[in-house]
Amino acid sequence: MKELRVSAIEKGTVIDHIPAKSVMKVVKILDLENSENTVLIGANLDSKKLVKKGIIKVSNKFFKAHEINKISLVAPEASLTIIKNFDVKEKTIVKVPKQISGIVKCRNSKCITNHENIETVFNVDTDCESLKLKCKYCEKVMEKDEIEFS
């Protein structure tokens, strides 16, 4: 069986175990299409865990907490691997935070966050079957598919 090989990166981050349907969402929310770094994207790869998965390798990029929070909302089981000098320095599974601030827009057009210069704050409910966000200010509840990043 032939196997697809993707070159290793010297330093940067590998985002693995992204559900296949969410790969391009992760690319978009991280604005990787406009990145000047080398970005390798694999989609619909065979996976024992997910059946089909995606992987993204970004050279010379180490994601900040708010970017990792975005990934967790789109791909809650994704893993992040930090690469330095071609070696794995750290590998973690993203965690969905209990509260997020400033990265998601409230869908309620009457919410104060859409009219005043106020940072959005959402409580994240992961106890239910799908992820839900509840606005701290207007209490509007959004499903995972309704999330719009700001």
Image (cartoon, rainbow, N blue to C red):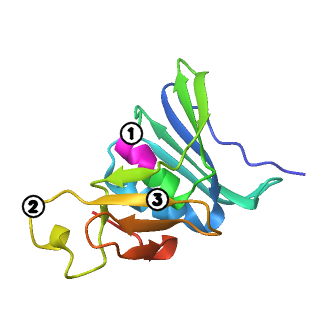
Single out the residue that lies furthest toward the bottom: 109
Extent of the magenta region: 64-69
- How far from the left and from the top, in percent, is residue 75? 56, 57
Q: Are marks 1 and 3 in contact (CB under 8 Å)?
A: no
The nearer-to-camera label among 2 and 3 is 3
Q: Are marks 1 and 2 in contact (CB under 8 Å)?
A: no
Residue 65, labelled with which disc?
1
Q: Say which residue appears at 36% left-offset and 60% top-offset.
A: 122
The nearer-to-camera label among 1 and 3 is 3
Residue tagged 3: 124
The first of marks 2 and 3 along the sequence is 2
Work out how far the residue at label 1 is from the one at label 3, CA to CA, in angstroms: 16 Å
- How far from the left and from the top, in percent, is residue 132? 50, 68
Q: Amino acid at mark 1?
A: Ala
Q: Say which residue appears at 9% left-offset and 61% top-offset.
A: 117
Q: Say which residue appears at 52% left-offset and 50% top-offset.
A: 96
Q: Which residue occupies the foreground of this view, 7 or 69?
A: 69
- The quarter of the rendered structure image containing the C terminus is bottom left
